[in-house]
Amino acid sequence: MQLGAPSPSPPAAQRAPTFQAHVSADARELLGALLPRRPTVRLVQQAHARLTVLGLAAARVLPHLLAVLPRIPHTNSPHDGASYSLALFQRSSSTSTFASNQLLRVLPHPLPISLFPRLPRRNPHSFTFLLCSISNHLDATGPAGSACSFLGSHVHALAVKAGAGDDLYVRNALVHFYAVCGDVGAMRRVFDEPPRVRDVVSWNAVLAGYVRASMVTAAREMFDEIPVRDEVSWSTLVGGYVKEGELEVALGVFREMVEQGLRPNEAAVVTALSAAAQLGLLDHGRFVHGVVQSTGLSVSVNVGAALVDMYAKCGCVAFAREVFDGMKRKDVFAWNAMICGLAAHGLGMDAVGLFQLFVTEGLCPTNVTFVGVLNACSRSGLVAEGRRYFKLMVEKYSIQPEMEHYGCMVDLLGRAGLVHEAIELIQGMHITPDPVLWGTILSSCKTHGLLDLGVTVGCKLIESEPAHDGHYVLLANIYAKAKKWDEVRKVRKLMSSRGTSKSAGWSLMEAQGNVHKFLVGDTDHKDSVQIYEILDMINKRLAEAGYVPDVSSVLHDIGDEEKVHAIKVHSERLAIAYGFMVVEAGSPIRIVKNLRVCGDCHEFSKMVTVIFDREIIVRDGSRFHHMKHGKCSCLDYW
DNA sequence: CTAGGGTTAG
């Protein structure tokens, strides 16, 4: 279509409905050609003026103008799409159902609700848009928008009264609405009510409702009943399993989807990548990446960010960087994933540098960005920078610090020996401090040998969380550092008398397409005998090189000999021994742990990297340890 | 001429 040249007017005799449809189509096409994908109000105004010059009737142009407006970024200013469309609508005094429906679609909550009663004409579309507006708001505000759930059921009643209750789209919007409310009963009633007007969207909406309600088993049952499933059905199920932490199952469903010849959509890929990232299993992540490449799915912003996150969390920070640098467009998710990834790998300077680049690109950081930056500072001992960024976050970006931000700062200050400043920070918090923060203080008391303070904090912590074994261990270590052996014994006794719970530690390894899980002293593995033989061999070689086990982190009331034994079969060492069996020399042994590395295992692993010239990469509960030539990327800070 | 379901970071 050539712009600027009005289409020739047909003779008057032909001005039947066909002509009106023709003009209408022209208005839409012209607008499409005149406007970019993300127009501004100003551009829409200019386009409007041109259409008027071309002689198109306002009543014909208006609906299409309104339809364009959702694409304008929402800014809350009087120049954003919603305000402009309302002004347009009021000025035109239009009564067309189409135009007012577009308005219901465009306007932000709660304007559609207040507009609705004044609409002279409604059709099923009107109810659909209104319900959609309510659901969106409810979804965005959570339980705080509970007034909306009342409104929604009111709209439900109105729709039924208006005879729109059997309309497929209205039904689906209602199913979605009740799903967002968390009212699975009402959701099912709408879904099951005769006449059963259903399509795959209805099924998917119910599926998503069960997922929201954390009823993934019910979701699975529904999934199995769907007559014809589409990509959304699959991706919703994958997402459901990820949400419930059933990550292996989620990846299994994704795999099944691919095996059935379906082309996974973006949502399926992103959630599957998230599952692989959370598991930390590189082979699984690579599989999903491979599916992206082989199906020709474009690496969009979302997929790119998810890939960056996956590679970083699976220990391949260099790959993550490669994907990141190759992304044409990067959103804040991508930047956050990269900054946090660098921080987790102990590359604090790179993370801070990347943050600076992020700011110079004119992007706005989020609370998560600052978690990454502060973490980076704390891991690299950048005290002045950490303080500066904490201040910047509050003062320039008006982001209220959350527990994680305080956690980073307390860690940063405590590690630098500024324990009293860290305590002042905790005492000045506007939210109730998590005991973890005091645990961090306790840990820095140990590092800096602060006996009195350590005892005060340690006793309080033990009092408030008597079942937490870490507190006893730290307190006993603090006494031990001051050579107060009587007190050490008392703490040990207290601990064993209470039988404190300790979550079982495990270590994972990927090999030949399988995942191998080890527990402490585990003999369940099919190659168990060989694993222990190798471990013996490793221990012998380490002992020859002068390695002496440090049992100070084992605090059970048992003899030293037993302690050495307990340490020798920590899950991590079993995994390393197995790594000797299955990982070819020259490739790193990759291990994923649920807990943090114990001090002695850390030393042990580092020595292994020297004596056997192997690389070991451990992802523990909070960071990565890249060990090579006897050095660790964590700089022994952990 | 309009509409409904799924999506990622600490």
Image (cartoon, coloured by chain):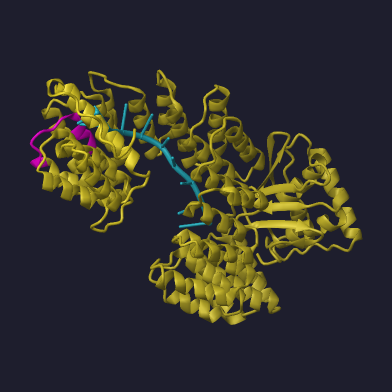
Chain colours: A yellow, B cyan
The foreground one among A291 and A90 is A90
Residue at 56% across, 34% down = A251
In this picture, residue A7 sits left or right of residue A436: left
Image point 43% across, 64% down: which residue? A402
Q: In the figure, is residue A556 to the left or right of A162?
A: right
The answer to if A122 sits in the magenta stretch is yes
Regarding residue A491, the answer to whether it shows in the image is no
Measuring from the top left, give residue A368's x and y in whole percent: 48, 59
- Main SS class of the magenta portion in the image: helix
| Quadrant assignment, res A129 | top left
What is the number of callouts on the image? Answer: 0
Q: Quadrant of residue A637?
A: bottom right
Q: Residue A503 placed where, x, y %?
A: 59, 52
Residue drawn at the location 64% of the way across and 42% of the way down: A281
Residue A531 visible somewhere in the drawing = yes
Give the image location of residue A101, x and y in percent: 19, 37
Q: Residue furthest right?
A: A544
Q: Position of residue A25 (x, y in %)?
A: 26, 30
Rendered residue at 26%/59% (across/down): A77
Q: Where is the C terminus of chain A found, in terms of image quarters? A: bottom right
Which residue occupies the foreground of this view, A123 or A386?
A: A123
The quadrant of the picture occupied by the N terminus of chain A is top left
Give the extent of the magenta segment: A117-129
Q: Is residue A443 above or below residue A98?
A: below
Question: Is A302 part of what is drawn in magenta?
Answer: no
Q: Is residue A435 above or below residue A217?
A: below
Q: Is residue A233 above or below residue A582?
A: above
